[in-house]
């Protein structure tokens, strides 16, 4: 499933980034910074309210080889979990 967008991952994240209220490109930049400190296979959780985040993270995962799962939460919050390649 490299580079795919799938249903929610049930493994607890190694780290979490709260990007709610941030506009593009900040959620992705915040996630990239957090991912750089994590080992391969680690999971990063990102919370975002930016409407373009799902598309942005799907493209990022495809290019970088990560796996992304997206879950819609109440109040237009996206919970993205990224498994680092």
Image (cartoon, helix red, strand yellow):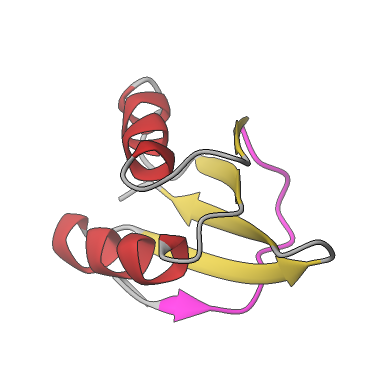
- Which residue is at 81% across, 61% downward? 75
Q: Is residue 15 positioned above or below 56 on the image?
A: above
11 vs 44, left or right, is right
User: What's the magenta bit mostly, secondary-structure-wise?
Assistant: loop
Q: Which residues are magenta?
A: 5-14
Name the residue at 57% across, 45% down: 46
Residue placed most toward the observer, 80 or 21: 21
Tag count? 0
Q: Residue furthest left?
A: 63
The quarter in which the N terminus is drawn is bottom left
Q: Is residue 7 magenta?
A: yes
**Which residue is farthest right?**
74
Q: Who is closer to the viewer here, 3 or 26?
A: 26
Image coords of residue 30 (percent x, y)? 40, 31
- Residue at 40% over, 64% down: 67
Residue depicted at x 34% and y 25%: 33
In the image, farthest residue toward the top: 37
Asked if 40 appears above or below 59 in the picture, the reply is above
Q: Quadrant of residue 5?
A: bottom left
**Where's residue 16, x and y in %?**
63, 33
x, y percentage for residue 79? 65, 57
Q: Nearer the viewer, residue 15 or 55?
A: 55
Q: Position of residue 13 (x, y in %)?
A: 65, 41
61 sits to left or right of 53: left
33 relative to 12, above or below: above
- Seen in the image, is 21 located left or right of residue 51? right
């Amino acid at each position: 499933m490299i580079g795919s967008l799938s249903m929610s991952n049930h493994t607890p994240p190694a780290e979490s980034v709260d990007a709610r209220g941030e506009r593009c490109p900040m959620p992705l930049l915040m996630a990239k910074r957090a991912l750089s400190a994590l080992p391969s296979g680690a999971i990063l959780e990102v919370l975002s309210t930016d409407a373009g985040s799902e598309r942005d993270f799907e493209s990022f995962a495809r290019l970088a080889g990560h796996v992304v799962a997206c879950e819609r939460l109440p109040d237009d919050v996206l919970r993205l979990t990224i498994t680092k390649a």
